Image: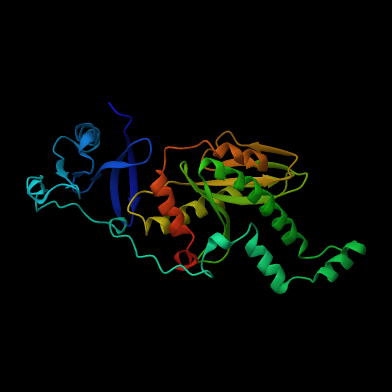
Amino acid sequence: MSDLTVNPWKRHGRDRLYVNLPDGTTVAWADRATKVITVKVQKYRHEAVVLLRQHLGDSATVYDEPSRHVAASEQKTAVRPPRSAPPVASRRDRPLKLPELTVADDLAQNRPGAVLLEAIAARGPSSAQRAWSKVLRRSSEWDSWYTGLEGERRVGRELRRLSAHDWRVLHGVPKSNGGDIDHLLIGPGGVFTINTKHHSGASVWVGDEMAKVNGGPPLPYAASSKAEAAYVQGVLERHCTFAVPVEPALVFVGVASLHRAVTQYAVRIYQEREVSSLGPLSGKLTAHQAEEVYAIARHRRVWLRP
C-alpha cells in the first residue's frame, strides 16, 4: 500500500477525515456526520476507501469526484452520492477571494522587526536622545523595544538561510485583534509561526503553557505561541481549499541555557542558531500549495479581517 495517512480536521462546525499522500496532496476525504467518502484521485481509490471505512464503518457511501480532464460522457458514469446524504461543503470548499495586492499591503516588503521599528520611529526617542541616555547610563522604557528589535533581526537572518530549502518567510504579520506575529515561515514542511524572545545571558525554562526566565514569574510564552498558530491556520484556511498545517515555534536569542519540560511537545523550542533544523522538513505542502499559501499570507488585509 502507498504511504497514505488519515488526518482529522474540524473547523466551522465540520468534522472531516482527509487521506493525504506524504507530500500533503489530498486523495480523498470523508464527512463524519453524513458518512460520505469523496475520492479525488482515482489511483488511490481502493486504499483510501479501506482506510476511511475503518473509521466510518462499511456502510459509508463512496462518491467519485469527476476529474476536470475527464470527458463529459465519462463524467456521467461517475457514482453520485445519495440525495439524502450529500457531501457538506465547508468554507474551505469555497475559498474567499483575495483582495488586490498593492505595494502598501504587501507584507513581503517587511524587514525583520518592521513593526517594532515603525513604533520606535513614531513614538520613541531620537538617535540623539538615545545616545545621551547611553552616555548617562540611564535606562529607558524603550530599552526592551530595542532589545526585541535586535532579537527579531537576528532570527530573521537565520530564517533567510532557509530559502535554499525552498522556504519563504514573512515578517511582522499583523493580527486583527492587535499585535503581530514576528515571523511566518512557509515551505515544504508546512507553516510555522515564529515567536522571538531575546533574553541575553539568561537561563530559560519552557513548559507546556508557561516559561520562566532566571527562575522568575511564569510567562505565557508557549500558550501565546499556540494561540498564534491557531489564528494563522484559521486565516489561511479561509482562503485555501486544502488543509494548512501550522505549528508554533519559540526562538530564544542570546540565552545562556535553554531547558524544555519533558511534556513539551506542542511548541517547537529553539535557540536562534537551531532554526536551521527546520530547513530539511518536507512532506506537508507541495511546491504549488506552498506558493499558494505564501501568495495569500503576504496580503496585509487578509490578516486584518475580523
Query: Looking at the picture, does residue 167 appear above or below residue 298?
Result: above
Between 207 and 141, the one lying in front of the other is: 141
Q: Residue at x 34, y 40 (%)?
A: 7
Residue 284 can be seen, yes or no:
yes
Q: Residue at x 34, y 50 (%)?
A: 242
The number of callouts visible is: 0
Between 228 and 187, the one lying in front of the other is: 187
Query: Looking at the picture, does residue 9 appear above or below residue 119?
Result: above
139 left or right of 155 in image:
right
Q: Residue at x 81, y 65 (%)?
A: 140
Q: Residue at x 70, y 42 (%)?
A: 204
Q: How is the image coloured?
A: rainbow
Between 85 and 280, the one lying in front of the other is: 280
91 left or right of 284 in image:
left
Instruction: Point out residue 152 in the picture as x, y percentages from the top left corner.
Output: 66, 54
Instruction: Point out residue 153 in the picture as x, y percentages from the top left corner.
Output: 68, 53
Q: Quadrant of residue 214?
A: top right
Query: Looking at the picture, does residue 190 appear above or below residue 103?
Result: above
Query: Looking at the picture, does residue 196 appear above or below residue 165?
Result: below
The outermost residue toward the top is: 1
194 left or right of 293 in image:
right
Residue 218 can be seen, yes or no:
no
Q: Quadrant of residue 114?
A: bottom right
Q: Quadrant of the N terminus?
A: top left
Instruction: Point out residue 104 in the picture as x, y percentages from the top left corner.
Output: 54, 70
Q: Quadrant of the C terminus?
A: bottom left
The outermost residue toward the right is: 136
Instruction: Point out residue 9 in the picture as x, y percentages from the top left corner.
Output: 34, 47
The outermost residue toward the bottom is: 122
